[in-house]
Structures are given as structure tokens and as C-alpha cells.
Image: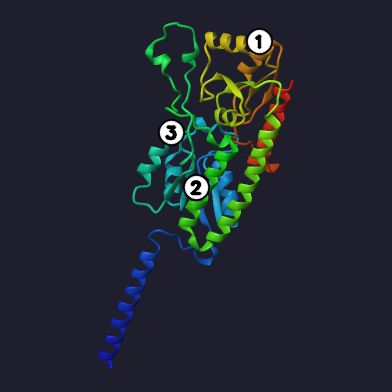
Amino acid sequence: MKKLGLKLSAVLLATSFALAGCTGGKTANTTEKKDGGKIKVYASFYPMYDFAKKIGGDKVEVTNLVPAGTEPHDWEPSAKDLAKISESDILVYSGAGMESWIDKVDQATKGSKLVKVEASKGIDLIKSEHHHDHEDAKEKDHEDAHEEHDHGEYDPHVWLAPQNAKIQMKNIKDALVKVDPNNKDYYEKNFETYSKKIDDLDSKFSTSLKNTKSKNIVVSHEAFGYLCKAYGIKQIGIEGLSPDSEPDAARMAEVTKFAKENKVKYIFFEELVSPKVAETIAKEIGAKTAVLNPLEGLSEDQLKAGEDYFSIMESNLKVLLEALNA
């Protein structure tokens, strides 16, 4: 009996190892959630957070790394943030140079099961422009002439063109399907729903902006290149791709001259940065100021009010129409 018991134990032990081996192979590329657990997703800033929530629905738990009301260009992950990211299932980041800290994540998450989603993958990127290129033949030092505010070669604000936002949603959907294939149909259905909403928004922008009196806007920060390219508008930025850059006197004079010559009636600024420079130019030319939201982050009040990508873009369209038809 004792020998029989030992043999039976050995068989059971071998069986358990075999089953464990099968399970291990299965979870190498997918995340099996027991007891209705949700896929844990971290998003690099608001649009990525909003898109992940929309596609993931009630199957995901999404955390926005950047606190409400914080300018994401200024944000860096702490050691605690990096630890949380490495323990999650998916990190959604926009890419194209928006997240200067992504290399830190790569280092901190080596060997983890984390799936990183560069949401801008597949988007036709716009090369960034240097303000100094537009100045008269004044000599500037090399360092000043090539300052790019830590963004690199491309404009990272891709999400402001609705069709780019659709590509980002698709990349997020594909990652969710990879990590959680059992809910593929659910994610596909959500993507189809929001893809249709994106197409409707795009059509509304295209139709509404087609025949405006003016095609020129002056903005505090050059975040609207993709939006402008999509709908035939020209943006003139007081500052560069980063809202933290300070325009020099020559740039201020250049923008003021452009605004006067083109009868610009509105100078746009953003809620997350100081309107001081925009107000200075507006006062100089007798224009109004208004918010054109780059959707880099929402305030607590906006989140509580249920604002999202679509509602903010609708508000942007409304203020653009007011400005371009003034």
C-alpha cells in the first residue's frame, strides 16, 4: 500500500507539472484574468487615457499617468510610477517624441510582461518647424537656431486630426486583442462604434471649415499642425512645439505683424499654460483671446462634467468657426 501511494503521488505530481507547463506556454503572449479581473492599462496622458477607456470599456482598468490639470510636456515618471507600469499589462503612449521619458520605461520594464503600444505608429508625421527659419537673415548662434524644445524631428500632436485619432484607437484595440483575445469581439465592436464617431467628427470639421472667410490662426503653442493640415488652415505659433518656450522680441514682432496684415481677430491660448503672451499680442492688435484646446490634459472640472475627446473637439470647432469667420 505504501509503494502504491508513493507511485500515485508521483503520477499526480508529474501531471501537475505537465499542466503547469501548458498553462505557462499559453500565458506567454496573453493575460488570463481570473474572477473577472480587468486588464490593467497605464496611459501616458489624457488622449491615450480617453481612447483606451473607450475601446477597453468595462474590460479594462485605465490609469492616466499625468494628473488632471498638469501640462504633459513637463511631466516625468517617478520611480513609483515606473514600478506600477512594469506591473501592468499595457502601457499606451502616443510616441512621435511626445513622451521624452519613454526610454526610462524601456529600462525599467525589461523582462516584464508589459505590452507597450506606440499609438502613433502608422501615422504620416509632420516635420517640426523652427521659428528661427522664418526670421530675416539675422545671424543666430547654432544653439539658439536649432533649439527644438526636447521634441526632436517631428510634431508629436497627432491626435488633433480626427483620422489620426482613429489610427491611434486601432493600435490600442490591436494591443487589447493581443493581450486579451477572449474579448476580441468586444474590443472590435467598441472600435467600430468610435471609428464611426471619428468619421462623423471629421466630416463635420471638413464641411464647416471649407468656406471660412480666413484660413489663418495664431496660437500660443504650435500644437495644431495636423488639424490645420487636415482642413486647409495655416497656424502661426507664438511659441514652438513646447508651451514652455518663451518667444523673443523678434518672434513677438513677427507674429504681431502677421496678425495685423491678415486681420486676425482671435489669438488662441491654452488652459494649462499662461495666457500672458497671447493677451499681449491681442491687446497690441485689438483682437480677442480664446481657448483652443490641444487636448493634452483636462482639468478636474472638465472630467467631472464628463468632457472627452469628442466634446472638446466640438468646442474647438465652434471657436475656430467664430475666429475664422469674424
Residue at mark 2: 171
Q: Secondary structure at mark 2?
A: helix
- Tell me if mark 3 has few (under 14), some (14-19) or many (20+) residues whose alpha carbon lies within 10 angstroms of its own: some
* 196, above or below 220, in the image: below
Left or right relative to 158: residue 262: right
Report the mark closest to the observer, 1 or 3.
Answer: 1
> For residue 260, which numbered disc appears in the image?
1
Q: Secondary structure at mark 3?
A: loop
Mark 2 and mark 1 lie on one chain; the one further toward the N terminus is 2
Q: Nearer the viewer, residue 148 or 108?
A: 148
Residue type at mark 2?
A: Asn
Residue type at mark 1?
A: Lys
Residue type at mark 3?
A: Ser
* 326, above or below 92, in the image: above
Residue 234 screen position, x and y as percent: 59, 22
Residue 46 visible to the viewer = no
At a point 54% along the width and 8% down the height, the residue shown is: 249
At a point 43% along the width and 52% down the height, the residue shown is: 87
Residue at mark 3: 100
At a point 42% along the width and 9% down the height, the residue shown is: 140
- The image quadrant that residue 238 belongs to is top right
Report the mark closest to the observer, 3 or 2.
Answer: 2
Mark 3 and mark 2 lie on one chain; the one further toward the N terminus is 3
Q: Residue furthest left?
A: 3
- Tell me if mark 2 has few (under 14), some (14-19) or many (20+) residues whose alpha carbon lies within 10 angstroms of its own: many
Q: Secondary structure at mark 1?
A: helix
